[in-house]
Amino acid sequence: MHENELDPLHPIKIEDYPKLFDYVLTAKGLVYFNQLKRNYFLQKQLTVDEYNKLRLLYIYYSAANKNTEEVSMWKKICVALDEKGIFEKDMFLSKQDLINQGLVLGNPDYVAGLYKKHIDFLKNS
């Protein structure tokens, strides 16, 4: 098995996943995330805003919990949505709404620029 299969955000080390993103889910956010995820897997129609929030909450949740299987699923969902023509739009507004509703809060372990290492790796691969 390749290292990338074990670590879907390679070259970021799994133990550093909780440092990747600026926000983490609150208890209320976890409930909302599970509702969105359930609706997605039941193939219910979501709004662009809800798809945006699903993308955000999914990666916040899976990275904070160092869950590589969920990170891989997040990547698959993002690709599937793009293939269906459901692209990120007004992501800043969706993120701001999550903050305003108390569904996410600032991540005290966040390290700015760390996720860029993964993006740079993908671009150069």
Image (tube, rainbow, N blue to C red):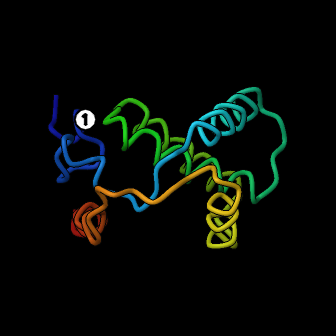
The image quarter containing residue 33 is top right
- Which residue is located at x 55 percent, y 43 percent? 26
- Which residue is located at x 38 percent, y 58 percent? 21
User: Label 1 crowding class (10 Å Cα cut-off): few <14, some 14-19, many 20+?
Assistant: few
Coordinates of residue 111 in the picture (x, y in percent): 26, 65
**Observer-nearest residue: 59 or 88?**
59
- Which residue is located at x 16 percent, y 28 percent? 1
| Count of marks, rendered view | 1
Query: Considering the numbered disc 1 on the image, is that residue within a helix, a strand or a loop?
Result: helix
**Observer-nearest residue: 66 or 96?**
96
Coordinates of residue 4 in the picture (x, y in percent): 21, 42
Residue 52 in the image: above or below residue 15: below
Q: Is residue 71 left or right of residue 33?
A: left
The image quarter containing residue 110 is bottom left
Q: Amino acid at mark 1?
A: Glu
Q: Which residue is mark 1?
A: 5
Residue 25 in the image: above or below residue 94: above
Q: Quadrant of the C terminus?
A: bottom left
Residue 97 in the image: above or below residue 113: above
